[in-house]
Image (cartoon, grey):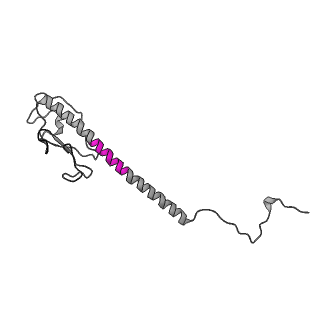
Amino acid sequence: MKTTSPAFKQQPSSQKFVQSGFTLLEMVIVLGIIAMIMGGAIFTMQKISDSGALTVVGGDFSSIENALQAYKTNAGNYPSEQQNLEALVTKPTTAPRPRRWIQIMNEVPKDPWDNTYVYKFPGSKDRSRPELISLGKDGLADTEDDISSQE
């Protein structure tokens, strides 16, 4: 009597092999779902980034205003608009010349969008204090995304 081992048993010819795996359609659907999740995550991260940028602007306003107050204490007045914030870094050569001058900052910071802060003295709301303005994400003056230190 001839016996065959179970591993080499012949399959009946009526039984078909079933292949397993993913079809192209299934792969496209999965990739589409992943793309939608990634798009949502990127959108959310953009909002977080904008919030962080506003925090940086607020911190810059505080530090520049403190530096301007120190300048006024030494010089007797705030820098003119012509002297600008550079008066905190280099001694002004135009009027009004400071009585005493010391370098208060190594460099004037730029806003998170790499724009220079706009300096106005007197300010638009409080005329006794300087006003700092960030041009915002678009970098254009007098648009809705501008941020003022006097708002």
Q: Say whether residue 71 is magenta.
A: no
Q: Which residues are magenta?
A: 45-57
Instruction: Specify whether residue 108 is in view.
Output: no
Instruction: Look at 14% across and 29% down and name the residue there.
Output: 73
Residue 32 pos. (x, y %): 47, 61
Q: Residue furthest bottom?
A: 14
On screen, residue 78 versus residue 16, left or right, reads left
Q: Residue 87 appears in which quarter of the rendering?
A: top left
Image position of 19 (left or right of 116): right
Most prominent secondary structure in the magenta stretch?
helix
Figure label count: 0
| Rendered view: 143 above or below 76 | below
Compared with 51, 3 (above or below) is below
Corner quadrant of residue 81: top left
| Residue at the (25%, 49%) spot, across then down | 136
When asked about the image quadrant of residue 55, the answer is: top left
Q: Closest to the observer: 1 or 52?
A: 52
Residue found at x 20% / y 33%: 67
Image quarter hosting the N terminus: bottom right
Expressed as whole percent of the image width and height from the top left, the position of residue 146 reads 22, 49
At x 33%, y 44%, the residue is: 52
Res 25 seen here: yes
In the visual, does 149 lie left or right of 9? Answer: left
